[in-house]
Image: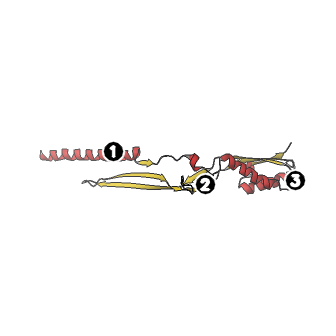
Amino acid sequence: MKFKMDDKKLKIFVIIGLVGVALIFLSTFLGGEKQSKPIDDTKLSEGMLTNEQYEQKLETEVGEIINSIEGVGKAKIMVTLLNGIEYVYATEESVNMDKTNTAEQTVAQRQSSEKKTILIEDDNGRRKALLKTTLEPTVKGVVIVCEGGDDIIVKERVTEAVKAILNISSTRVCVTKLS
């Protein structure tokens, strides 16, 4: 009879252990990762280009080159983007890992992490996020309407120039005659 009592106690300990492990794993999925509050993009983007400004910059730069090609004449350029500019800010992450060993050699782990954006002060004493890198948008397509757009040689020169400047394929470049 004493053997059965120990067997019941062992079953109770195993069940309690399994419930404890299940609760630990459940807590990692429900609330284990904490993130800092989102940063106000209007404050971060001071002095940075908007998507529209980036498109205009590309149009101006491409236009300067295209207008210098022989036979083009007067030209209008439109650049469309596939996605927007993405600013990546420096972050620091702290990870806490707790391990628990029980008498039955069951190992329970709990991991939590917290990410914070690194803030710096500018010359005016304002706090800003530290910019790590800027990911430029992908050019979706370029349309060039020019006086020489009906000449096959001018079309080829313009297409090749745009391909080289923006690193895109010729299928994304349309050159046509200005009416």
Can residue 81 be seen? no
Amino acid on which the number 3 mark rests in the picture:
Gly
Query: Disc 3 vs disc 2: Cβ atoms closer than 8 Å?
Result: no
Q: Disc 3 or 2, which lies upstream in sequence?
A: 3
Horizontally, is 127 left or right of 76 in the view? left
- Whole-angstrom CA distance, mark 3 to mark 1, is 74 Å
Helix, strand or loop at label 3? It is loop
Rendered residue at 74%/57% (across/down)? 164
Q: Which residue is mark 2?
A: 134
* Residue at numbered disc 1: 23
Disc 2 versus disc 1: nearer the observer: 2
Residues 117 and 27: in front is 117
- Tell whether 145 sits left or right of 101: right
91 relative to 165 in the view: left or right: left
Give the image's coloring scheme.
Answer: secondary structure
Give x and y (percent) for residue 125: 54, 55
x, y percent for residue 2: 12, 46
**Image quadrant assignment for residue 105:** bottom left
Task: Where is residue 40? Give x, y as percent.
Answer: 54, 46
- Sequence-first disc among 2 and 1: 1
Q: Which residue is mark 3?
A: 71
Which image quadrant: the N terminus?
A: top left
In the current view of this chain or complex, which residue is farthest to the left? 1
Query: For the view shown, which residue lies furthest in the front direction?
Result: 124
Nearer the N terminus, badge 3 or badge 1?
Answer: 1
Label 2 crowd (10 A; few <14 / some 14-19 / many >=20): few
Q: Amino acid at mark 2?
A: Thr
